[in-house]
Image: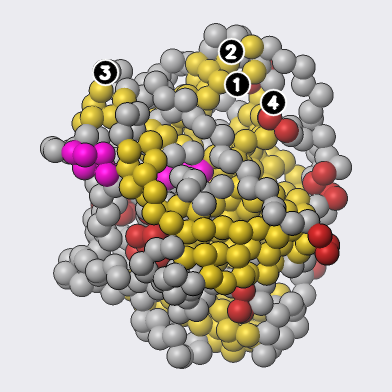
Amino acid sequence: MVTRRRMLVGTLATTGAGLITGAGLLPALRTETARAADGPGAVALPAPFTVKMPQLPVLAPYSTQGGQDAYRVTVKEMTREIIPGIQTKVLTYDGHFPGPVIRARSGRQVTIRHRNNLDMPISPHLHGGNVTPENDGGPMDTVAPGSARTYTYPNQQPNATLWFHDHAHHMESEHVYRGLSGTYLLTDETERALPLPSGQYEIPIALRDARFDENGQLVYQMDDFRGRTTLLANGRPSPYLEVAARKYRFRLLNTSNLRFFRLRLADGGQIVQIGSDGGLLERPFTTDTIRLSPAERADVVIDFSRYPVGTKIVLQNLPGAGATEPGNVLRFDVVRTAPDPSSIPEVLRTLPPVDTLPKPAVERKIVLSMDEDGRVDARGFIDGLQWDPDRIDQTVAFGTSETWTVTNANQRIPHNFHMHLVQFRVLERNGVPAGPAEAGLKDTVELMAGETVKLHATFGTYRGTYVYHCHLLDHSAMGMMANFRVR
């Protein structure tokens, strides 16, 4: 079980950032052949952009009969090469680090039988999935060591970039840090009809941070934001990815426990965001920065045809105020030309305008907070209470819509907010209508210190008890979680 340790206070205020690595097309924060990873005694890492970024493996179902895709997954400890030449112990789904990709279709059921070969309980959770309580992977609804359980996902929801990860309470933080997360791409007819980049030109990228000891093993401490100075893209430190001079679609997922990403091309070049947590946006929008708090996803298109072959362009992680954090995420190396029949339509899907959403039956106010006075055993709270698995904090009438106004009451510590069961709409942030990145369906939203968001959700699919919590997983493990019951 994860030990509660003193929550990092001051440094978390400068979340997610990374030192800008220079200007132009060839920036790099460090150019030496090797560097210390995470302080004295840490293993030497390769120089940035000397390791190739791998593609995440796509799992194949063992059966497609009966109108469903059936998978078997074994959760086990393995050793995998993260740093070249070193075998690192990790926790895996079927031996993969990071976890694999499952491709699903709306309206077609998926079952996954998880066998737990660890010596600790697990609780697989499909993050963003609309599922029954017994298939949700609740914090206390665990799979014991040596046993197995089948989870059923009906996929009665639109296209979305979902993911799955462990949710066993007090262990979720360490389990996810050590590798128990994977990507779940749900598609539908609307998405498949669009001329977006596809096939080899659609690439899921799992982002996270890590800390290594002198033997190249992952170091886990519950409050170790500052120590995790190595950025991994698809499980490799600051790798490079060879691309053609054409459009690519990248499915970005932040699997970090605590780190916020602010992603930007080194030349400030355009990135077109086409989707977020709950799938495609109604309209694409052009930006130069993609913000991702832990568990958030962004679906983006980058057009490399604007760069000549031979260009090397870095994807950076920008620093927060006063921060000097790791900045090299990965480098795109434009190595060839290629035909490009893809395009980005002006309209991607239809969503109801927020002013036409169903009238809320209830308007709730939710307050996130945690101790930030430096005490050794910091606690997390929702509405002043730590999580009690037997307490129902909110009761929701089935079939109704509600608005939840969620506030981060802390002065320095950031949070975010994730609700199980539903995708919601962000109505306002700090009293202002949501920006384009939050205009679609969401299940996780960022809340910097003092911020407030107003959300609209409809609870019309399943009855039962679910959780809502901060998805900085250390915070939920410290008690920043609550229960709602739909009845």
Residue 322 shows in this picture: no
Q: Which residue is mark 1?
A: 243
- In the picture, the disc for residue 335 is 2
Question: Badge 1, how many Cα within 10 Å: few under 14, some, many 20+?
Answer: many
Question: Are the residues tagged 2 and 1 within 8 Å (C-beta)?
Answer: yes
- State the image coordinates of residue 218 (x, y, percent, origin top left): 29, 47
Is 325 placed left or right of 446 in the picture? left
Residue 231 shows in this picture: yes
Q: Which circle's residue, 4 or 2, is located before the other in the chain?
A: 4
Is 197 placed left or right of 445 in the picture? right
Judge by depth and name the residue closer to the eye, 103 or 291: 103
Q: CA distance from mark 3 to mark 2?
A: 24 Å
Residue at 66 percent across and 16 percent down: it is 245
- State the image coordinates of residue 78 (x, y, percent, origin top left): 39, 49
SS category of the residue bearing label 1: strand
Q: Which circle's residue, 3 or 2, is located before the other in the chain?
A: 3
Q: Which residue is mark 3?
A: 32
Q: Nearer the viewer, mark 3 or mark 4?
A: 3
Q: Is residue 77 above or below residue 7?
A: above
Is 421 placed left or right of 412 in the picture? right
